[in-house]
Image (spheres, rainbow, N blue to C red):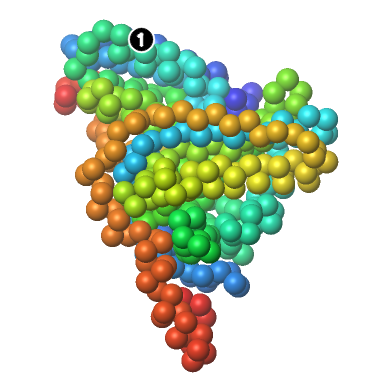
Amino acid sequence: MASGFSEFQASVRRQDGTAIIEMSGVMDSSAEQALNSAYAEATSSPADRLLLNFTDVDYINSTGIALIVGVLAQARKAHLPLVTAGLSEHYQEIFKITRLADFMSIYPDESTALAAV
Amino acid sequence: MTDETTTQQATKRDDAWAKPVDKLTVSDAPIGAMNLNVDGRGLTGPLQGFGQLWQKTYRIRLEGAEVSPQDVVAYWKANLPSLMPDDSRFYPSLTGVKPGEVLLINATLPGMPGGMPVSTGVLVLYADDEAFSVMTPDGHPESGFNTFSAYDDGGVTVAQIQSLARANDPVYEFGFRFLGGGAQQERIWQHVLTGLAGNFGISNAKVDIKKVCVDNRLQWGRASNVRHNAVIRTTLNAPVRAVRRLFGGGAPA
């Protein structure tokens, strides 16, 4: 894990048919288990969509992006629409260059995302 | 740790990413490199290709080597071309393996006697002290990312290559499944890791390979990616290159 940042954590809650994965800390290789567990919990009961909340994520490296690709691939396979909220401007650019943005709507914050879906 | 220090670290790590680009640009091809199918191409990630999406992880433990993950990655960046096998040559720009740089690749794929030449390349998407990642352009055999990294595992440094990619079009998917393309890919990364370990005095380490099919579906909506196929374009361009060589027509195409 990158020094100076906190360990990755992910929790799941539900609101109006949306399964929300709220994340914090650093998304790198150490985040794999927590993210996959959160995805499994989020999809353990029916949801209309999945929202990834990045508001408290400090840093994402290329392995973290690969983890997000894995979640997105699983969601697409399950026909579960995926939206994101709370990405900084920098990471919105990273999502564009990596072409992740082709497959998910990006909102500035959770309330905007929930109002839009 | 102060907020200022954390902010400085965040800025440094944000600089590890390539700046957004719509199209790749190759201004000067390194000597000996054929520059085809890269300049002007868009990037294509793991979700844009055609074939099954695979995550393949190759690891080698540098047991007994007194070397840090940072040392391994520094050596890797500086010596990537010499670590590649003869049938998959990498040509970094003069700047080296840095975010936003393009590495040209001249390779030979299996499928016919003597192999099929392919000129392509990758963008260095990310690079820090412990890892670097490359992303493929349209027409590349695969669509996705490769991450080269090293980490400490209980006092032993482990070097790792992880690809998250799918065949870019139906022709490549056929080649990976039935013409030996998949096996060649595994052999290439095993060659790189054993060569890397050899540099640090490890001669008998085994490469561990883990393969996970992340998405087994074929994305038929992406079948038209074949119009960018770098093998087909490289093959069709061969007569042009031959004529240019015959008449001394400047730098390689």
Observer-nearest of A25 and A44 = A44
Left or right of A92? Residue A112 is left
Residue A29's image quarter?
top right
Give the total number of marks visible in the rendering. Answer: 1
The subunit carrying tag 1 is A
Observer-nearest of B215 and B176 = B176
* Residue beneath disc 1: A41
**Vertical comparison of B121 with B52: above or below:** below
Give the SS element for disc 1. helix
Residue furthest toward the front?
B113
Q: Position of residue A105 (x, y in %)?
A: 24, 33
**Vertical comparison of A45 with B178: above or below:** above
Left or right of B80? Residue A88 is left
Residue at horizontal 46%, vertical 28%? B212
Residue furthest toward the bottom?
B247
Observer-nearest of A41 and B221 = B221
Three-letter amino acid code of the residue under disc 1? Glu
Quarter placement of the N terminus of chain B: top right
Q: Position of residue B177 (x, y in %)?
A: 41, 43
Residue at horizontal 37%, vertical 64%? B232
Residue at horizontal 59%, vertical 35%? B58
Q: Position of residue B194 (x, y in %)?
A: 71, 42
**Vertical comparison of B149 with A46: above or below:** below
Left or right of B200? Residue B227 is left
